[in-house]
Amino acid sequence: MREKLFKTRDIFIILAIVIIATTAIFLLQPKQKGNVAVVTYNGSVIMEIDLGKDAVYHIDADLPVTLEVIDGRIRFIDPQCPDKLCEGFGLIGEEYEYAICMPAKVSVQIKSA
């Protein structure tokens, strides 16, 4: 007598694993799509940056700063301030995250579009 490769119970277990894995992949996707970075200088909004497009932005502030957008997140790069603390914020992209360069008086806050 020939034995079945999979029993009915095995098929249900495999289907359950596939459904759970697929659901987890969709639920754990980064929620950065559609977010924008609101850039302020000296307390006034000077631009909103779409985080869906990789780019580099140069801002002439009290001290020049450069912002880089990568994969839906943004960061300060090559700041001209003496302590370079703003680089320590790293890449931000989730709603309500922020980064500030105090000497340049520039801040970046993430908001949903």
Image (spheres, helix red, strand yellow):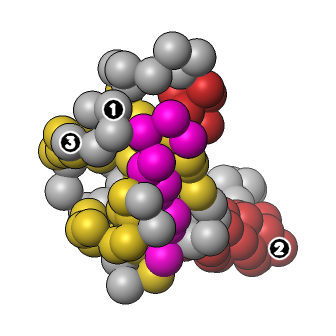
For the residues carrying marks 2 and 3, which lies nearer the camera in this image? 3
Q: Residue at x 51, y 15 (%)?
A: 82
Q: Is residue 22 magenta?
A: no
User: Taking 23 as reference, is 108 above or below it?
Assistant: above
Q: Which secondary structure lies at badge 3?
A: loop
Residue 74: x percent and y percent? 40, 47
Relative horizontal placement of residue 5, taking residue 55 as reference (left or right): right
The answer to which of 53 and 103 lies nearer the viewer is 103
Which residue range is magenta in the image? 102-111
Residue 51: x percent and y percent? 31, 61
Mark 2 nearby-residue class (10 Å; few <14, some 14–19, many ≥20): few
Label 3: which residue?
60
Quadrant where the image shows the C terminus: bottom left
Which numbered tag is attached to residue 102?
none
**Residue 11 visible from this viewpoint:** no
What residue type is disc 1 on?
Answer: Leu
Q: CA distance from mark 2 to mark 3?
A: 66 Å
Q: Residue at x 82, y 73 (%)?
A: 9
Quadrant where the image shows the N terminus: bottom right
Label 1: which residue?
63
Which numbered tag is attached to residue 9?
2
